[in-house]
């Protein structure tokens, strides 16, 4: 396992990530889907990182949404761990193998110290599956200049 000194603290990790690029990747990935992707960087905490990710995903309110198609990437720098957690709707469509592949991709980039690129690539892959299984829902807005009545 490659150890990266920038991985040791939340503050150092956040300074090394191009947050604007990650934000653009999320906006692009969510553009044509009803799904939601969130990235969170956890402060130091005691307890299980996987359980913390599930609780965080629930706090985002994805269970209240009908499709349950939210995805959370939780990075715990102090623990040198991350979790990619999909809500029940998206998990039912893609299964465990998909999440394992995303984690391998993200882990490889993180081991190289390329945190931004790892997040951007993982978000893009997740976005593809969200678009495939949960396309954007049509809106009631009229695009022809007519007023609704």
Image: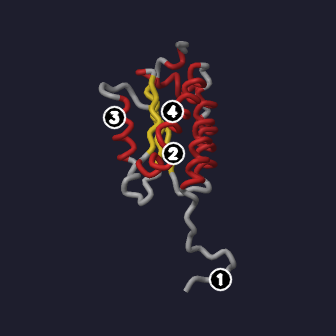
Secondary structure beneath dot 3 equals helix
- Residue 60 is left or right of residue 25, and the answer is left
Question: How far is mark 4 from mark 2, CA to CA?
Answer: 11 Å
Picture coordinates of residue 64, whole percent (x, y): 37, 57
Q: Residue furthest bottom?
A: 149
At mark 1, the secondary structure is loop
Question: Within 10 Å of the Cα at label 3, are there few (<14), some (14-19), or many (20+) other Cα atoms?
Answer: few
Q: Residues within 10 Å of mark 2 (few under 14, many from 20)?
A: some
**Distance from Cα at disc 1 to Cα at disc 4:** 48 Å
Label 2 secondary element: helix
Mark in the foreground, 3 or 1: 3
**CA–CA distance between discs 2 and 3?**
20 Å
Relative horizontal placement of residue 52, taking residue 86 as reference (left or right): left
Residue 91: horizontal and vertical position, in percent? 45, 46
Residue tagged 3: 51
Image x and y of residue 70, in percent? 46, 49
Residue occupying image coordinates x 61% and y 54%: 31
Determine whether label 4 and label 2 are within 8 Å by CB: no
Q: Which mark is residue 100?
A: 4
**Residue hosting label 1:** 146
- Secondary structure under tag 4 reads helix
The residue that label 2 is drawn on is 94
Task: Name the residue: 52% across, 13% down.
Answer: 1
Assess disc 1: are there few (<14), some (14-19) or many (≥20) residues with their C-alpha within 10 Å of its C-alpha: few
Outermost residue on the left side: it is: 47
The mark found on residue 33 in the picture is none
- Mark 4 vs mark 2: which is more N-terminal? 2
In this picture, residue 108 sits left or right of residue 96: right
Q: Disc 3 or 4, which lies upstream in sequence?
A: 3
């Amino acid at each position: 396992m490659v150890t990266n000194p920038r991985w040791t603290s939340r503050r150092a990790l956040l300074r090394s990530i191009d947050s604007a690029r990650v934000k653009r990747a999320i906006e692009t990935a969510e553009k044509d889907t009803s799904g939601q992707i969130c990235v969170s960087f956890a402060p130091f905490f005691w307890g299980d990182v996987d359980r913390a990710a599930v609780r965080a995903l629930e706090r985002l309110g994805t269970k209240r949404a009908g499709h349950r198609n939210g995805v959370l990437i939780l990075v715990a720098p102090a623990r040198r761990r991350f979790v990619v957690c999909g809500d029940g709707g998206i998990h039912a469509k893609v299964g465990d193998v998909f999440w394992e592949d995303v984690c391998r991709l993200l882990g490889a980039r993180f081991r190289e110290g390329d945190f931004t690129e790892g997040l951007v690539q993982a978000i893009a892959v997740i976005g593809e599956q969200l678009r495939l299984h949960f396309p954007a829902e049509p809106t009631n807005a009229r695009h022809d200049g007519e007023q609704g009545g």
